[in-house]
Amino acid sequence: GQQVMQIPQYQHVQEGEDFTTYCNSSTTLSNIQWYKQRPGGHPVFLIQLVKSGEVKKQKRLTFQFGEAKKNSSLHITATQTTDVGTYFCAGYNNNDMRFGAGTRLTVKP
Amino acid sequence: ETGVTQTPRHLVMGMTNKKSLKCEQHLGHNAMYWYKQSAKKPLELMFVYSLEERVENNSVPSRFSPECPNSSHLFLHLHTLQPEDSALYLCASSQGAHDPGELFFGEGSRLTVL
């Protein structure tokens, strides 16, 4: 069955540094979503990517969907303390949505 | 306020207890989900309901019993749980179950089984 791997598991950065998390699927995806979960909170939807090679930006966040629609990345430029939390990808194909294990980001002021 | 409300937020129960988790969505969605979130594990889909009919059950032990009386309410009945069932149980909703798009999550019910 479909598997979604996400790396790294943890990332600790100094405020102002960049951060990237990567998501890889064992199968081609119809779309991929990204969620953010603050400590003690619940997952909140960030974005959905559908097209091969798609790139979307939300302020300091840049999301990419690979040409083969099997991988994706989330890049945060100049992290802030408000960026702390766990970032999850969720790949969807054939009525099956699988979440990655998440990348937990901590930011040192 | 996410539009998806879960109660209780915290629950402690013994292995012989029977309890229920409740979820209500105010978004007019047609699909509702139960997910289990354990430490260092991906979110695990437990049940999916579309228009009050169960469409997926991912080999969840029978000690977890879902109920969806209408498209706005979802319950998870708990009976004879094990300590390893301790986790955050998240309810979510979406417009539909097929190619669901954005999932709206509740704040979760933190379950501890003693």
Image: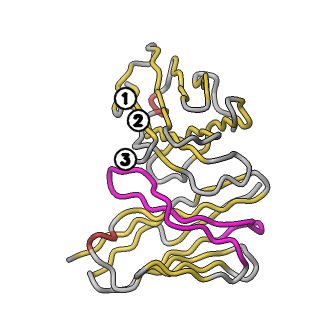
Q: Amino acid at mark 2?
A: Ser
Q: CA distance from mark 1 to mark 3?
A: 16 Å
Q: Which residues are magenta?
A: A24-51
Percent of width and height locating residue A74: 51, 76
Q: In front: mark 2 or mark 3?
A: 3
| Marks 2 and 3, the one that precedes in the sequence | 3
Residue that badge 1 annotates: B8
Front residue of A56/B56: it is A56
Residue at 46% in and 78% down: A58
Q: Secondary structure at mark 1?
A: loop
Instruction: Check the image and report above or below for B77 versus A16.
Output: above
Q: Residue furthest front?
A: B28
- Mark 1–mark 3 CB contact (< 8 Å): no
Q: Amino acid at mark 1?
A: Pro
Q: Position of residue B94 (x, y in %)?
A: 60, 47
Measuring 69% from the left and 45% from the top, which residue is drawn there?
A: B97
* Side (left or right) of A46 relative to B31: left
Check the image and report above or below for B53 versus A14. above
Location of residue B72 in the rendering, given as x and y in whole percent from the top left corner: 55, 32
Residue under pointer 2:
B109
- Chain identifier of the residue bearing label 3 in the image: B
> Residue shown at 44%/14% (left/top)?
B17
Mark 2 lies on a secondary structure that is strand
> Going from the N terminus, do you reach mark 1 or mark 3 first?
3
Q: CA distance from mark 2 to mark 3?
A: 15 Å
The answer to whether marks 1 and 2 mark residues whose Cβ atoms lie closer than 8 Å is: yes
Q: Chain of mark 1?
A: B
Give the residue number, with chain letter if any, for mark 3: B1
Which label sits on residue B80?
A: none
Q: Does residue A27 lie above or below A96 as drawn?
A: below
Q: Local crowd at mark 2 within 10 Å, few (<14), some, or many (≥20)?
A: many
